[in-house]
Image (cartoon, grey):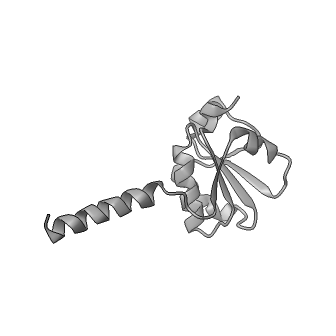
Amino acid sequence: MSMIQWVLIIIIVLFIVNRFMPVKGIMNISVQEAKNKFKDNNVQFIDVRTPGEYKANHRKPFKNIPLSNLASKAGSLDKEKEVVVICQSGMRSAKAAKILKKQGFQKISNVKGGMGAWV
């Protein structure tokens, strides 16, 4: 194999690892762990699904901030408080958690399985 091929392989592997490794400061929690946080006033609950999805099925105290609007609306959230994010399956909320992390939030929890896992 040539040097260029090795470099390409290394770049691809690093990209994949970076994409799927947990990010420091972001926890993956179960639906039950999310429910256990409902009475904590130092936790903000954000549902990043579309308004239509949210309207069809949501849980209090989750507030709807669609993923597409999250970066611009993050300023309305308190960086000192924990943020719990949820979506339908856990994929969009994982992206949301990374967006919040880049904006300086320290404690972020992503609900594993999202609303699909809600019982």
Left or right: 5 in relation to 68:
left
Task: Classify residue 98 as left or right of residue 84.
Answer: left
Q: How many marks?
A: 0
Residue 71 in sight:
no
Residue at left 63%, top 63%? 25
**x and y, in percent, of residue 103 in the image:** 58, 68
| Left/right of residue 60 with respect to residue 109 in the rendered view | right
Q: Quadrant of residue 51?
A: top right
Residue plotted at (73% across, 36% down): 59
Give residue 32's position: percent from left, percent from top.
Answer: 74, 39
Quick check: can you spot residue 38? yes
Quadrant that contains the C terminus: top right
Spot the residue most to the front.
1
Question: Which residue lies at the image location 59% right of the left edge and 64% below the top edge?
Answer: 24
Front position in the image: 110 or 49: 110
Is 40 located above or below residue 15 in the figure?
above
Q: Position of residue 90 (x, y in %)?
A: 56, 43
Q: Is residue 14 above or below residue 49?
A: below
Of 40 and 56, nearer the camera is 40
Query: 10 or 119: which is nearer to us?
Result: 10
The image quarter containing residue 118 is top right
Q: Could you say where residue 67 lies in the image, as x and y percent from the top left?
A: 54, 50
Left or right for 97, reference 10: right
> Considering the image in quadrants, where does the N terminus appear?
bottom left
Which residue is more in the foreground, 71 or 39? 39
The residue most toward the left is 2
